[in-house]
Image (spheres, rainbow, N blue to C red):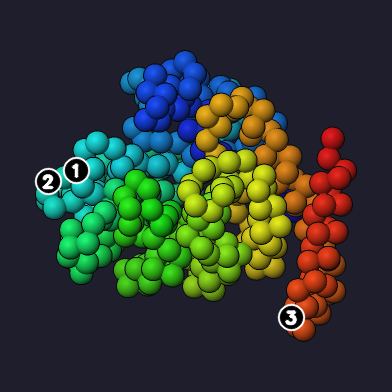
Amino acid sequence: MTNQRFGAGIWHFATYLDRYATDGYGIPRNIIEAIDLAGQVKDLSVVDLNWPYFGGEFSDAQIKEALDRNKLGVIGITPEIYTRDFVKGAFTNPDAGIRRKAHELITSACDVVRFHGADYVKLWPGQDGWDYPFQVDYSTQWQRSLDGVGQLASENPDLKFVIEYKPREPRVRMSFGSVARTILGIEKIGLPNVGILLDFGHAIMGGESAADSAQLAIDHGRLFGMDVNDNYRSWDDDLVAGSLHPLELFEFFYVLKKNKWEGVWQLDQFPFREDSVATATHAIDFLKAAAKGLDRLDIDALQEAQSRHDAIGAMKIAQKALFGALGEQD
């Protein structure tokens, strides 16, 4: 764990809006400025970039120049298939022309992934779903989701596609709404280059144990990426990782280590009112302490306690490792 890499969505360093502060929480910021802020975060090595690039017209070369001067790589490209054009869905839109537009946007993102040498195309189909009973035909809705992802994966066999599932928001019900449903869909697609990006916050807001969800995805060979953050379980608050559920997050990391999963630990946080650099730095400090805690964890004692379903014994072992490591942080 000493060589663990850390990443963040570039949106962590952007300017946020909501339906109240429609003028934004801070001054407008373009992607180059966001990259320069990300470069100020110690131990951050990669970022996930929105596509199209936000805040202006920028070439891939300009973005790479900004990344290089900040010593940052790219882990993924996230095409914006959840904006105004796609309010009735991207893969599942009733308009075939809009579905085609989503396909073309993601196809262009594939070339950006190749340019930057990123790990994957990240698909977050936030508008694919429904809001009311009888609004959609569920069979058609589901099949269009699978066909949309499957076509992209088959046309780009050299790339990985990760689906970031989420129970709700912006749709009241999202097509890829749980780990089990997403795995079921991926297995139905049947292609080796489609997997899951497991967002810790999305899992727990959906009533899942993120550790159990990770194990399920790993057992199916489909855990291609992960994001961490925190929330109060009722909504996707995207708070600082470890701020509310540190022990559950530690168990999530334990499952990754137990299965020798060696991907990037990536932040997906929205610091509306906080300093973005300080927030990312604080979160990574927690992740580093968690990694140190994993190195200290008495695995034999833990597994022995688990073999007896000894909840208190297992918690004592985990708490000692995590909180001991946290206590040594500066």
Looking at the image, residue 222 lies above or below residue 300: above
Helix or strand or loop: what does disc 2 sit on? helix
Q: Residue at x 77, y 84 (%)?
A: 308
Q: Amino acid at mark 1?
A: Lys
**294 relative to 92 in the view: left or right:** right
**189 relative to 165 in the view: left or right:** left
Rendered image: mark on residue 101: 1
**Sequence-earlier tag: 2 or 3:** 2
Return the residue nearer the eye: 82 or 74.
82
Q: Amino acid at mark 3?
A: His
Residue 283 at x, y = what percent?
Answer: 67, 39
Helix or strand or loop: what does disc 1 sit on? helix
Rendered image: mark on residue 131: none
Q: Is residue 62 visible?
A: no
Q: How many other residues sit within 10 Å of disc 2, few (<14), some (14-19) or many (≥20)?
A: few
Looking at the image, residue 85 lies above or below residue 142: above
- Tell us which disc is closer to us: 3 or 1: 3
Rendered image: mark on residue 309: 3
Residue 125 at x, y = what percent?
Answer: 33, 50
Q: Residue at x 52, y 43 (%)?
A: 237
Q: Which residue is mark 2?
A: 97
